[in-house]
Image: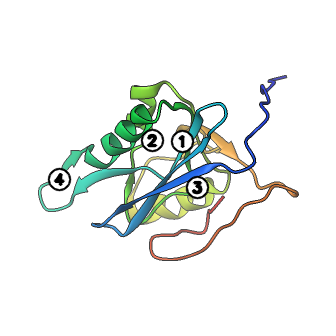
Amino acid sequence: MQHCELHQAAAKPAVTGFFEPRTGSIQYIVADPGTHRCAIIDPVLDFDEKSGTIRTVEADKLLRFIADNGYEVEWILDTHPHADHCSAAQYLKEKTGAPTAIGEKVTAVQTLWQGIYNLPEPREDGSQGGQTLRRRRGVQGGQHSGKGHTLAGA
């Protein structure tokens, strides 16, 4: 059985949003001011459709902010597969060593996209995105649908 180490969290987490103008996406860093541990949520990988190039400008901004604030990355989370941008989760995992996770309904989107984009068969458990997250009763949080949001939000 896997155990998680629990830490007493600060009364209010520090939440910082980073707007990515090309896609209109907002990336977040949520940190515990008491422990200086943080999570990166919905990081954007810069993809230029016209040239087919990938850059890490947005992800590097997040890493600079984390370093400037003395944070340690505990998690890199994608709330769901995004239709409006590529995820920088794997790049950030390589840079920080932090684990990645995505909403458990990722498999529904993978199955849908497999047929549309002629992709290889997805793993049944969605684990290619790291661990999968399940919604739990009693856990506070919010979710909204909007541009780029898919049916698999966590």
Give the residue displayed 75% in from the left and 48% down from the top: 11
Q: Which residue is mark 4?
A: 52
SS under mark 1: helix
Numbered badge on residue 110 = none
Q: Which residue is mark 2?
A: 89
Question: What's the coloring here?
Answer: rainbow
Gap in angstroms between the C-alphas marked 4 and 3? 25 Å
The image shows residue 74 at horizontal and vertical percentages of: 59, 32
Q: Which residue is mark 3?
A: 79
SS under mark 2: helix
Q: Earlier in the sequence, mark 4 or mark 2?
A: 4
Dot 1 alpha-carbon crowd within 10 angstroms: few under 14, some 14 to 19, many 20 or more = many
The image shows residue 21 at horizontal and vertical percentages of: 30, 67
SS under mark 3: loop
Find out whether the residues at labels 4 and 3 contact each other: C-beta distance under 8 Å: no
Which of label 4 and label 2 is nearer to you? Answer: 2
| The image quarter in which residue 145 lies | bottom right
The image shows residue 127 at horizontal and vertical percentages of: 60, 39
Q: Earlier in the sequence, mark 2 or mark 1?
A: 2
Find out whether the residues at labels 3 and 1 contact each other: C-beta distance under 8 Å: no
Gap in angstroms between the C-alphas marked 2 and 1? 8 Å
Q: Which residue is mark 1?
A: 129
Amino acid type shown at disc 1? Gly
If the image is split into quadrants, where does the C terminus sit? bottom right
Left/right placement of residue 152 relative to residue 6 reads left
Gap in angstroms between the C-alphas marked 2 and 3? 11 Å
Specify whether residue 100 is in view. Answer: no
Dot 2 alpha-carbon crowd within 10 angstroms: few under 14, some 14 to 19, many 20 or more = many
| The image quarter in which residue 55 lies | top left
Which of label 3 and label 1 is nearer to you? Answer: 3
